[in-house]
Image (cartoon, grey):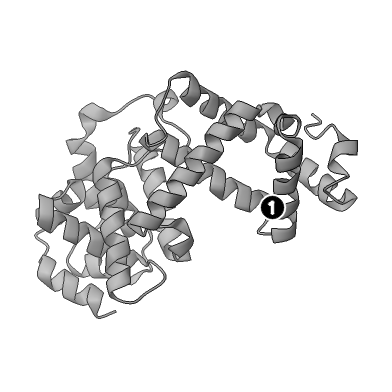
Amino acid sequence: MQIIENLTMTQQYLTQEQHDLLEARLNQGQAEWLDFVEQAKSHITQGRDLNDPEVRQMAWQWRSDIRSFVADDLQLYEALIQLYQQEGAEAASWGTLDAPTLEYILKAVALLSVREEMVGFSWDRLTPETSEVMRRGQEAMRELHLNFFGTEGLILGLLTVETTPAAQALKNQHVYLVIAQNLIDDWLAKCTVSATDIPAEIPFTPRTYRVLQLTAEEANQQGNKQITPQHLLLGILQEGETTGGGLAMQVLRECKVDCDLLRQQLNSV
């Protein structure tokens, strides 16, 4: 399928090499791209607010995919932006992405960026290990047949990436992945859904957003620009102190974790 059809138009902004590279990448990820566009159009049809968790998740996905798409090539990214700015709807028509859908996505991304700046939690601040924790948490929720990402997804992600100081601190207090999985599976057995009802990017719950905010605050207080798995676990503990916590804290309580000792261990890393 030829997604970039108007070569004459693109030659004004892209070199032949850039054009060929983008077309190859678009064609390679055609199925995923079309699914993403349909998801965005569905949000518009449903009248979803830009602050809706699933819309925010979509914005995250878009931003991540764009960076991957241009492979962090700033010149290529700026050429694409110039193309969209100058050609508008015609440029946006590539790959069935019409102008209203593109505008909706870009507004969601802009709102997400402002929100992240205010909260302080940005994907750009995550260490590779923390990004892997978040990815594994998504996988864990999918394996449990859940269509939401609560704090239980965070604790499962932390336990799955076993090489981090956070995972070792949990292990030292006898918190193991299989135990957490069994507990959460029992607690959420009535919340499971079919595989078709689980979105490509599972949205965070409000409590999880609060933990992420506290995670960023923990990193800021320690003078760290990057957010580590230790900060994430500290965010879980902090949220648990103020509200009683979600299922992540319930796992820690079931395992008889000494939270004060755990906090000391994390802060000493």
Image vertical order of residue 74 relative to residue 187, above or below: below
The image shows residue 215 at horizontal and vertical percentages of 29, 61
Residue occupying the point 79% across, 41% down: 23
130 and 145: which one is in front? Answer: 130
- Under tag 1, what secondary structure? helix
Quadrant containing the N terminus is top right
Kindly tell me whether residue 181 is visible in this rendering: no
Apparent side of residue 238 relative to residue 124 in the rendered image (left or right): left
Residue occupying the point 41% across, 44% down: 139
244 and 252: which one is in front? Answer: 244
Kindly tell me whether residue 207 is visible in this rendering: yes
Q: Can you name the residue that lies furthest to the bottom here? A: 268
| Number of numbered markers | 1
Image vertical order of residue 29 relative to residue 194, above or below: below
139 and 178: which one is in front? Answer: 139
The image shows residue 132 at horizontal and vertical percentages of 44, 57
Q: Which residue is mark 1?
A: 70
